[in-house]
Image: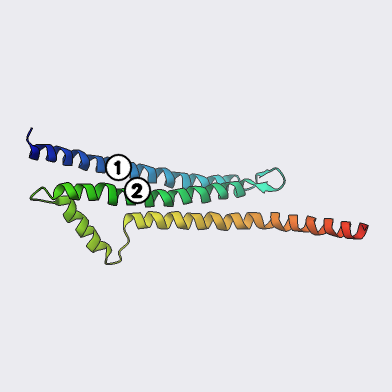
């Protein structure tokens, strides 16, 4: 196998790896979207369930939802970085040895498109993750507020008893 054929085979292998990585990215995003919907449904169907002392299932699912949305956003960002840096830079470097540079041209086209301030799919994914985290945070605050108020009332009552007993 000559040098040009070897470079082409490495290029082809790396391009396939990039596509497999992108497919894994879509599967990961599907997992997070399904998890998001499942948590919302669980919150709806377990709204009246209370654990321990006034801790509702909704509060627990809100915390889980915030965590899932945070991980989702981090995952989207991580995949984007890896695709841009790891795969694109390596493929573009290999393409320098070819007369035609399809991935380099594609990347330039995407960059030109992005410079027009148009939302890309990954931007939409991040937006949904942030929106979900804010939604779960709002639910968390609404669920935790009565618990904090009840604890504060108990604290004030205990302080009143201690002061009155002295």
Q: Position of residue 94 (x, y in %)?
A: 16, 46
Determine which of the numbered discs, if any, sits on residue 40 in the image: none
Image quadrant holding the N terminus, namely: top left
* Residue sitting at x 22%, y 63%: 112
The x, y position of residue 124, in whole percent, is 37, 57
Residue lying at 57% horizontally and 58% vertically, measured from the top left: 138
Q: Residue furthest front?
A: 3
Q: Quick one: SS at disc 2? A: helix
Answer few, some or many: residues within 10 Å of disc 1's Cα (few below 14, many 20 plus, some between 14 and 19): some
Left or right, 43 with respect to 9, comes to: right
Label 2 near label 1: C-beta < 8 Å?
A: yes
Could you tell me how far apart the alpha carbons at marks 1 and 2 are, in whole angstroms?
8 Å
The residue located at (37%, 49%) in the rendering is: 78
**Residue where numbered disc 2 is placed:** 79
Label whose residue precedes the other's in the sequence (1 or 2):
1
Residue at image position (88%, 60%) is 163
* Crowd band around label 2 with a 10 angstrom C-alpha radius: few (<14), some (14–19), many (20+): some
- SS state under label 1: helix
Q: Position of residue 154 (x, y in %)?
A: 79, 55
Q: Is residue 40 visible?
A: no
> What residue is disc 1 on?
21
Residue 41 or residue 3, whichever sits in front = 3
Q: Position of residue 160 (x, y in %)?
A: 86, 60
Task: Count all numbered tags in the image, as a single digit.
Answer: 2
């Amino acid at each position: 196998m000559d040098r040009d054929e070897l470079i082409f085979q490495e290029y082809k292998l790396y391009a396939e790896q990039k596509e497999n990585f992108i497919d894994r990215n879509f599967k990961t995003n599907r997992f997070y979207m399904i998890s998001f919907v499942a948590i919302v449904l669980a919150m709806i169907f377990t709204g009246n369930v209370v654990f321990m002392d006034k801790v509702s299932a909704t509060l627990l699912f809100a915390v889980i939802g915030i965590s899932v949305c945070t991980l989702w956003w981090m995952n989207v960002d991580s995949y984007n970085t890896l695709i841009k840096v790891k795969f694109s830079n390596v493929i573009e470097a290999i393409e320098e040895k070819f007369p035609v540079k399809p991935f380099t041209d594609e990347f330039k086209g995407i960059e030109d498109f992005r410079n027009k301030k148009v939302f890309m799919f990954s931007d939409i994914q991040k937006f949904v993750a942030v929106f979900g985290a804010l939604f779960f945070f709002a639910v968390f605050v609404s669920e935790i507020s009565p618990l904090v108020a009840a604890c504060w009332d108990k604290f004030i009552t205990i302080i009143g008893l201690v002061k009155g007993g002295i």
